[in-house]
Image (tube, rainbow, N blue to C red):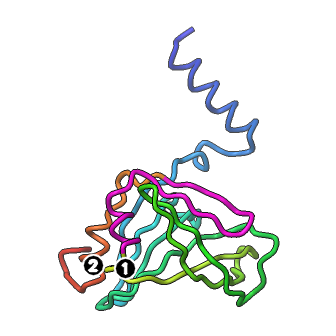
């Protein structure tokens, strides 16, 4: 039997076993996108609503936001909490607000910081980032995260899109 056929059959079987179609098994990746008003650096599956983490800004400002879905049972809508963001071995405590995603019915957490903060500098040079919010913990690779592009787009540089 052909090795490629064996691999393909095993992959599809694994996807079915774990409840995912081959399309859903697509890996998350970093994508930079912008509208006329906002720029987004998103770690998720392109062209889906699968987002693990995103950083975004309003064009023309130095205000950044870190946004992520967080399955934290002890959150309440509008609650102020803390996102503990660790990059390059340094932990930054970012005040954040909890909200309920009306479409998905899950909690999201969003905190703001400035592009001139040390947090942003550490994100730019780190290999990965870890985030803890109450009992929720997650880590994400930062390989291919275009922070320079996000910074450029946030500043209003048309070349940053």
Q: Which residue is rendered at x = 37% and y = 64% of the image? A: 122
Q: Nearer the viewer, residue 47 or 148?
A: 148
Q: Quadrant of the C terminus?
A: bottom left
Q: Nearer the viewer, residue 80 or 47?
A: 80
Residue 18 within the segment the image draws in magenta:
no
Quick check: 8 above or below 105?
above
Q: Are marks 2 and 1 in contact (CB under 8 Å)?
A: yes
Q: Quadrant of the N terminus?
A: top right
Q: Earlier in the sequence, mark 2 or mark 1?
A: 1
Tell me where the magenta segment starts and ends, as one range.
Answer: 118-140
Q: Label 2 crowding class (10 Å Cα cut-off): few <14, some 14-19, many 20+?
A: many
Q: Which residue is rendered at x = 75% and y = 87% of the image? A: 77
Q: Nearer the viewer, residue 104 or 114?
A: 114
Quick check: 22 above or below 112?
above
- For the view shown, which residue lies furthest in the right direction? 73
Q: Label 1 crowding class (10 Å Cα cut-off): few <14, some 14-19, many 20+?
A: many
Q: Position of residue 144 (x, y in %)?
A: 35, 54
Which residue position is annotated with label 2? Answer: 153
Which residue position is annotated with label 1? Answer: 39
């Amino acid at each position: 039997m052909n090795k490629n056929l064996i691999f393909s059959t095993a992959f599809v079987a694994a996807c079915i076993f774990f409840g995912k179609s081959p399309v859903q098994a697509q890996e998350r990746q970093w994508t930079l996108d912008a509208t006329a008003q906002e720029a987004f650096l998103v770690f998720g599956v392109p062209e889906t609503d699968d987002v693990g983490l995103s950083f975004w800004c309003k064009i023309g400002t130095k205000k950044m936001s870190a946004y992520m879905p967080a399955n934290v049972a002890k959150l309440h809508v509008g609650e102020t909490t803390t996102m503990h963001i660790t990059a390059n071995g340094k932990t930054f405590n970012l005040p954040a607000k909890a909200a309920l995603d009306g479409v998905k019915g899950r909690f999201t957490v969003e905190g703001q910081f400035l592009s001139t903060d040390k947090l942003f500098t550490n994100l730019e040079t780190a290999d990965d980032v870890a985030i803890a919010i109450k009992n929720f913990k997650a880590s994400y690779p930062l390989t291919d995260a275009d922070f320079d592009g996000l910074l450029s787009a946030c500043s209003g540089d048309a070349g940053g899109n």
